[in-house]
Amino acid sequence: MGSEADKFIKNRLSRTAMIDSRIKKLLAYIIDCYNKTVEDGKQYDYSKRGKISQENFLRNGLVNDYLRCNLNSLNSGTEYYTVINKESNETYTSAIDGLTHDDPIDIHIVDKALQASWNTDKQIYYALECKRISQLSDSASYIGDIKKSTERDYKGMRLPYEGQIAFIENSKLTHIKIAEDINKKLSTHTSIITNKPLEAVQISNSFNGSYISVHNKIFGDNANFTIHHLLFDYSAIVIQ
């Protein structure tokens, strides 16, 4: 009986390691695309965004101009494939009102390697939410997305991992200052249970603004989940 339990734990740990490795590969790819944005001297002029919100304007640029255009490098040498969409809707039940809602996801990633790691024939997805930060107080809005993740019981096969991207528009704000401010606010937040505040993690040697945090859901068995944070310096990319 003990050997069966040991085997189960070993398989679960192995699967978790594979999923974690694949998510880090996806995040490293997003970082590479951000670095390419910087190297290209790419800029996004808000005066040319029309009726698109500023946040979506930057999100669209990242997805359309880089994440989708360079997918061959991510999928090279593998039988699996990745599809990256923006503004995709998924369904969840809110722990706040008990009702079913649509969740418009900023960046929605369907990855066959993740599906294989999860050992399911159902489509699973990885979600990233985006927020602009032009002043330190905007971290409150960024934390709002963490709060949403604690309250939502997703109906689809969504991994117990979330992703968040910050577009930092102010050259006076570093990712370190923002992470510190987020952690300060989380330490006194009355409705977000934080097991591990934002902690720097090196996903790519070419980027230092990546962090990880762990929180609890506020429904069911209060399962914990992980958020990967990418805090991108957009101060030279955005034209106000």
Image (tube, rainbow, N blue to C red):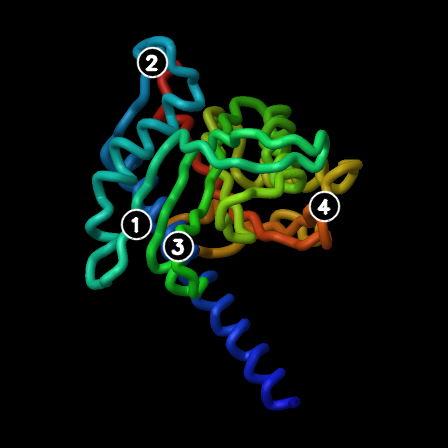
Residue highlighted by disc 1: 82
**Above or below, comparing residue 80 to residue 10 in the picture:** above
Tag 4: amino acid: Phe
Residue sitting at x 43%, y 51%: 124
**Above or below, comparing residue 38 to residue 28 in the picture:** above
Q: CA distance from mark 4 to mark 3?
A: 34 Å
- Element on which disc 1 rests: strand
Q: Name the front one of labels 2 and 1.
A: 1
Q: CA distance from mark 2 to mark 1?
A: 28 Å
Residue highlighted by disc 3: 204
Report if the CB atoms under discs 2 and 1 are less than 8 Å apart.
no
Left or right side of 226 for 193: right
* N-term-proximal mark, 3 vs 1: 1
Q: Position of residue 106 (x, y in %)?
A: 44, 32
Residue highlighted by disc 4: 219
Q: CA distance from mark 3 to mark 2?
A: 31 Å
